[in-house]
């Protein structure tokens, strides 16, 4: 199974990049995780005027999405999933042999068209995180979910 994290944002802070790399190197070989960075579009001062930025980012995202993969959108308005629920989803996807693309939007979120085409929308938390931290949290949770699936002691209930 291949998981691609498509994230709007480039050059995360060193601490976030180091954390992501630490978890990425821990994954088992049968689960390939990659991160595709999308350069953020130019923004004007007011968030309501940034629909053009979201549209530009949407076009770039759709160029990177695997049309045969499940598209999972991270959005604060989506339902929250527990780590065990994520592990069950991952186990199902692995059994189906289905690849998965996770999308993390830019500073003003994602274009509605991406959300409309998503197989599932998930919120990492009711809180708002910086995008670099959201990326790190997602990668750690995917690793933790893999550990649950494999009965590895990393996760403790």
Image: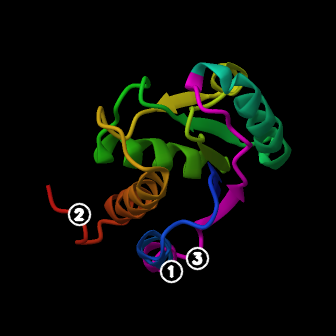
Residue placed under numbered mark 1 in the picture: 25
Q: Residue at x 44, y 79 (%)?
A: 22
Q: Nearer the viewer, residue 139 or 41?
A: 41
Q: Give the spatial CA distance, label 2 vs label 3.
A: 19 Å
Q: Give the spatial CA distance, label 1 vs label 3.
A: 10 Å
Which of pointers 1 and 2 lies earlier in the amino acid sequence? 1
x, y percent for residue 78: 44, 25
User: Is 87 situated left or right of 68 in this image?
Assistant: left
Residue placed under numbered mark 2 in the picture: 155
| 86 in the magenta segment | no
Label disc, if present, on residue 99 of the rendered structure:
none
Q: Residue at x 68, y 58 (%)?
A: 37
| Residue sitting farthest toward the left | 157
x, y percent for residue 115: 63, 24
Q: Residues within 10 Å of mark 3 (few under 14, many from 20)?
A: few
Q: Residues within 10 Å of mark 1 (few under 14, many from 20)?
A: few
Which mark lies nearer to you, 1 or 2?
1
Q: Quadrant of the N terminus?
A: bottom right
Q: Residue at x 60, y 41 (%)?
A: 106
Q: Nearer the viewer, residue 14 or 82?
A: 14
x, y percent for residue 90: 49, 48
Q: Residue at x 64, y 47 (%)?
A: 100
What is the magenta range? 22-47
Which of pointers 2 and 3 lies earlier in the amino acid sequence? 3
x, y percent for residue 13: 48, 69
Q: Quadrant of residue 39?
A: bottom right
Q: Residues within 10 Å of mark 2 (few under 14, many from 20)?
A: some
Residue placed under numbered mark 3 in the picture: 29
User: Is 119 situated left or right of 54 in this image?
Assistant: left
Q: Give the spatial CA distance, label 1 vs label 2.
A: 17 Å
């Amino acid at each position: 199974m291949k998981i691609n994290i498509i994230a709007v944002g480039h050059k995360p802070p060193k601490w976030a990049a180091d954390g992501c790399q630490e978890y990425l190197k821990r994954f088992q070989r049968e689960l390939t995780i990659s991160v595709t960075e999308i350069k953020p579009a130019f923004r004007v001062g007011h968030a309501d005027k940034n629909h053009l930025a979201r549209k530009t980012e949407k076009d770039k995202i759709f160029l990177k999405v695997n049309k045969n993969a499940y598209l999972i959108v991270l959005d604060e308005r989506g339902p929250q999933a527990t780590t065990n629920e994520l592990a069950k989803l991952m186990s199902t996807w692995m059994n189906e042999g289905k690849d998965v693309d996770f999308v993390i939007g830019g500073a003003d979120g994602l274009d509605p068209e991406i959300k409309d085409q998503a197989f599932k929308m998930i919120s990492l938390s009711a809180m708002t995180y910086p995008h670099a931290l959201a990326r790190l949290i997602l990668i750690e949770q995917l690793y933790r979910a893999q550990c649950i699936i494999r009965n590895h002691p990393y996760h403790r209930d």
